Image (cartoon, rainbow, N blue to C red):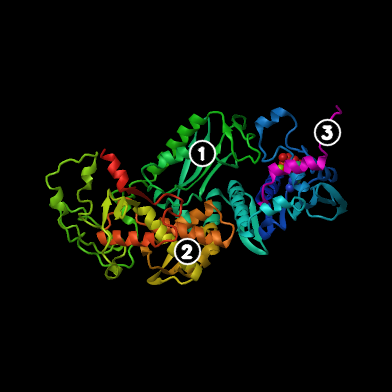
Amino acid sequence: MADIIRLLPDHVANQIAAGEVVQRPSSVVKELVENAIDAGATEIQLIIKDGGKTLIQVVDNGKGMSGTDARLSFERHATSKIQKAEDLFNLHTKGFRGEALASIAAIAHVEMLTRTEDDDIGTKIKIEGSKIVSQEVVVAPKGTSMLVKNLFFNIPARRNFLKSDQVEFRHITDEFHRISLAHPQVAFNFYNNGSDVFQLPATDFRKRIVHIFGRKTDEKLVPVDEETHVVKISGYIQKPEFAKKSRGEQFFFANNRFIKSPYLHHAILGAFEGVIRPGTHPGYFLNLEVDPGTIDINIHPTKTEVKFDDEHTLYAMLKSTVKHSLGQFNVVPALDFEQDLNLDTPYSYKNKQVGIPQVVVDSFNPFENVQPSRGNFGGGYSKPKVDGWESLYAGIETNVETGASHLEFESEVVNSSIFDNEKDTVEHTTTTFQLRKKYIITTIKSGMVVINQSRAHQRVLYENFLKNITIKEAVSQQLLFPLSLSFSPGEINILKEIKENLCTVGFVFGEIAEDGVEISGVPVLVVESEVQMIMEQLISDFQQEIPGDSFSQSDMLAKTLAKTLSVKTGETLDEFSQVKLVNDLFACKESTLSPFNKRVYVTITENDIERKFI
Ligand code: ADP
Ligand code: MG
């Protein structure tokens, strides 16, 4: 048989390698900006167009390249940063693989302009899909300008895989945050489609954080500082009361390089445990300085995952250092843990006056300590219409099933009535019963249905919001005083993207500034005090799962609102609300599944029951 193994031609090998290095425009930004930093630049400009798809340009004032180096830099495994394998264990630069420029040149149109301090004239090189188109001697300022156009022009499949310009822009912004935070002493200018995104002067770490995330961030920061022979930990954590629904502001840097470390992240969570609300995430900006020989950054091609020699020690130190900072700045006691968060869930149709609970069970009234604001959440407390039930259970101490004594009067004090302004319109033909503040049980011809109240309500709200978005006919309530909410510029960008859809569900926006928004109206279901929380949840959902088109954007918005506003497990519903929920659920287009594809109810037929009695 003839020999069949052949070496791949260089341009094919480069294209394959490019797949690893360049996933999307933000990867190009990362590589080019890191090269500029490695070249000792003190000022870097980043210019992009159309989410980086048509153009990415990075201009630096670093050391530049000679004509020969300029040409060589596009070869694979061409690097000035390491010479022998041992150098890998003492890295002080971002790059070292010598792959980035070769990869980028394989899949885009590239123009490089560069000059060193010692040379009088510079070099201009044009490369398209690994082929050198031209190399000229030109007049150029000291430093390097890299222009990357038409990314993936020769790999249509990859180009089609790119998301919308906005989404790609957001990835680039994330990358920009990471690099500019790691290098506050370098000045950065970032332009998108001709307009300013960030103008960051050279400064210190704290000011860099504030420049990026907005003025209000300053007051949230608590310094962290600890030095041992293993590691120097420095930076800032955010005060626990500013913990957010979104995970946006969590940054680890190891030797000035952004890293991801779920393990160390866990150490921080441990330190914050008990001082932040469940479901919220602490913010942190932490630098770890370790001996370059004790860290392996080579285990991942895009180099954000690292391996430390002694991770356990690092974990313990990080946790205790962060705890220490929390304690030292006396930020812990400011929180009120007495508050039961379950009670904070909004779902009344309108704001109400605080009502005194009408039912007093024995002498214990769980609402005695209710703060006035709570009245907003529950709506008027009304006595469940379960006359006679009490006597049925009188004398029964324990029930057959464990814990089923709870069956007793779960709705002794009903703290919620979701639909009370419609009370008169619903017929009371359905019989319902609430079980363990979690399920609504109702009868059907063939037996009974057990409905998960929270999922059912999610479904109802979800379809409702989707309908409103589609027909653009939401009802909103005007706020007496517009709310001013503060966000980071990144969050504001996301808000701007989803603003139109938010308006269709009933939010009314006033001015949108760089680091805050004014909201003058909210959907009828939404309670004023919850608006910040809802917005944060929305932003966080959009950050994590970036929807590509406007349909999926509406869908996601409806889902998030439904999740946030729905009745939760643990909430008692009065009989009216139970019946209304059941009726609304079965009026839905799809009543069997929640918007998150979870089962909403199960049916138990008479046969099923009878079989149990055999
Ligand atoms: P690496 O950064 O891993 O060395 P790259 O392909 O990114 O590999 O770059 C190859 C080489 O080109 C670098 O080692 C460096 O010598 C040179 N280079 C790239 N970008 C610049 C720049 N902006 N300024 C000066 N030299 C650069
Ligand atoms: Mg590089």
The reply to whether residue 487 is in sight is no
Element under label 2?
A: helix
- In the picture of the structure, the residue carrying the numbered disc 2 is 466
Q: Amino acid at mark 1?
A: Pro
> Tag 3 or tag 1, which sits nearer the N-term?
3
Q: Nearer the viewer, residue 94 or 420?
A: 420
Q: Are marks 2 and 3 in contact (CB under 8 Å)?
A: no
Q: Residue at x 51, y 51 (%)?
A: 248
Query: Where is the N terminus found, in terms of image quarters?
Result: top right
In which quarter of the view is residue 348 placed?
bottom left
The mark lying in front, picked from 2 and 1, is 2
Q: Nearer the viewer, residue 421 or 433?
A: 433
Query: Where is the C terminus found, in terms of image quarters?
Result: top left
Give the number of callouts: 3
Real-space CA distance between mark 1 and mark 3, rounded to the nearest whole angstrom: 42 Å
Q: Residue at x 84, y 48 (%)?
A: 131
Q: Is residue 506 above or below residue 129?
A: below
Please state the extent of the stretch shown in magenta in the rendering: 1-25
Magenta-colored stretch includes residue 13:
yes
Q: Is residue 115 above or below residue 79?
A: below
Element under label 3?
A: loop
> Tag 3 or tag 2, which sits nearer the N-term?
3
- In the picture of the structure, the residue carrying the numbered disc 3 is 6
- In the picture of the structure, the residue carrying the numbered disc 1 is 262
The reply to whether residue 498 is in sight is yes
Q: Amino acid at mark 2?
A: Leu
Q: Nearer the viewer, residue 133 or 235?
A: 133
